Amino acid sequence: INASACGVIQTARKHPDKIGKVFAGRNGIIGALKEELIDTSLESDDAIQALIHTPGGAFGSCRHKLKNISENRREYERLIEVFRAHDIGYFFYNGGGDSQDTAYKVSQIADKMGYPITCIGVPKTVDNDLPFTDCCPGFGSVAKYIATSTLEASLDIKSMCETSTKVFILEVMGRHAGWIAASGGLAGQGEGEPPHVILFPEIPFNRDAFLERVDHCVKEYGYCVVVASEGAQYEDGRFLADAGAKDAFGHTQLGGVAPALANMVKQALGHKYHWAVADYLQRSARHIASATDVEQAYAVGKAAVEMALDGKQALMPTIVREQGKPYVWKIGEAPLSEVANQEKKMPIHFITDDGFGITQDCRDYLEPLIAGESFPPFDNGLPRVAKLQNTLTEKKLKTEFQL
């Protein structure tokens, strides 16, 4: 997300005749509503360049869902007040499906409320579930991390399985789409190589089949490595790890599929196990980023500004795969109205017939996305990261906005 921000800011700086300052909303759309605008013009060129090798979101983020204009006109009127007060004519919003929904709703201000704002969505989601784009910036690096972690952990489990741990379960992100779990499959190349089981949200979970497969692998290979998507669910749609709560977007809060699976293994098979949750580590592991991913993340940020300056409206730059081997891609575009709140799931031909692995088609899709290394610079053994001032511009409105 920072690499895309770098692309936006650096490209805008090349057009001072058309773009004066770039403000960053502190904590996303919340910053725009509360008139908490970070003046990026106060940051040095070196500081902005450092964003490209810095994980996290340098300007903050939020989990706030804009309702439709008809449902909550107050928020849109506030946005217009803030935009007008600070002479904001371009709006770029970086994120996944919910963020593209926000971008689309903000773009409607121009049509429905008469304020001239050009709005472009910038794709970024580790879940890789945005439609129309071949892949989503952020995913390639997470895929590289999960594939690498699966490979390395598998070697550790294999080395001790004779007298210790037999089953290792790695839980990865992916609520409804199994792209991240699939990337773990890159760790193994042939029969018997881990991961031995991948659990996808797209394939209904069958407890008996899962346990049979785990037991077979332990008996045949001495150990079993499982990569499980957090969104693994039963045929009736119940998540294995449903925590019984909802988040700000109405999504089910998931409470941990790895311990749930480990408990099944313990009770049914009695094998010694260990489990791990990649959680935030998988999406913040900038030290092992994919060079392809970093290049694409910057490119969509750059393209977003260029689209806006060309007068385009309510679009999202996309990545178009022109060729698989060697991998060739270009920037395309898709309307926000068709992107918002849509999810791209794993094609069924990317999953093996038994439901526990990836096919060659899937491997051919994934491999170019993790290609190349883009190591950050290191100081005293630790990655160097951007350290921004994040100075807020002076507020011009007299009223405070309450969310």
Image (tube, rainbow, N blue to C red):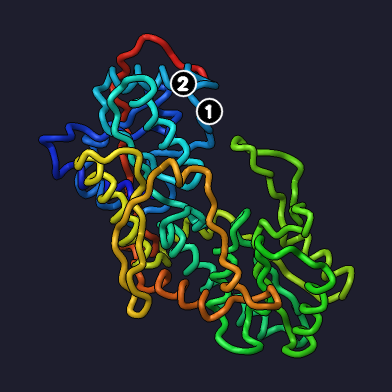
Give percent across and percent down for residue 172.
Answer: 61, 61
State the image quarter where residue 183 is shown.
bottom right
Number of labelled discs? 2
State the image quarter where residue 52 is shown.
bottom left
- Mark 1 lies on a secondary structure that is loop
Q: Callout 2, which amino acid?
A: Glu
**Going by the picture, which residue comes out furthest to the top?**
398
Q: Which mark is residue 67?
A: 1
Give percent across and percent down for residue 380.
Answer: 35, 62
Give percent across and percent down for residue 310.
Answer: 20, 42
Residue 162 located left or right of residue 108: right
Give percent across and percent down for residue 132.
Answer: 43, 56
Say whether disc 1 or disc 2 marks the residue closer to the N-terminus: 1
Taking the image as drawn, is residue 276 in sight?
no
Q: Callout 1, which amino acid?
A: Lys
Q: CA distance from mark 1 to mark 2?
A: 9 Å
Residue at the spot x=44%, y=49% of the render? 56
Q: Is residue 2 above or below residue 112?
A: below
Q: Tell me whether the residue at label 1 lies in contact with that at label 2, contact meaning CB atoms closer than 8 angstroms.
A: yes
Mark 2 crowdedness (10 Å alpha carbons): few <14, some 14-19, many ≥20:
some
Where is mark 2, residue-wise?
Answer: 75
Residue 125 located left or right of residue 167: left
Residue at the spot x=62%, y=85% of the render? 193
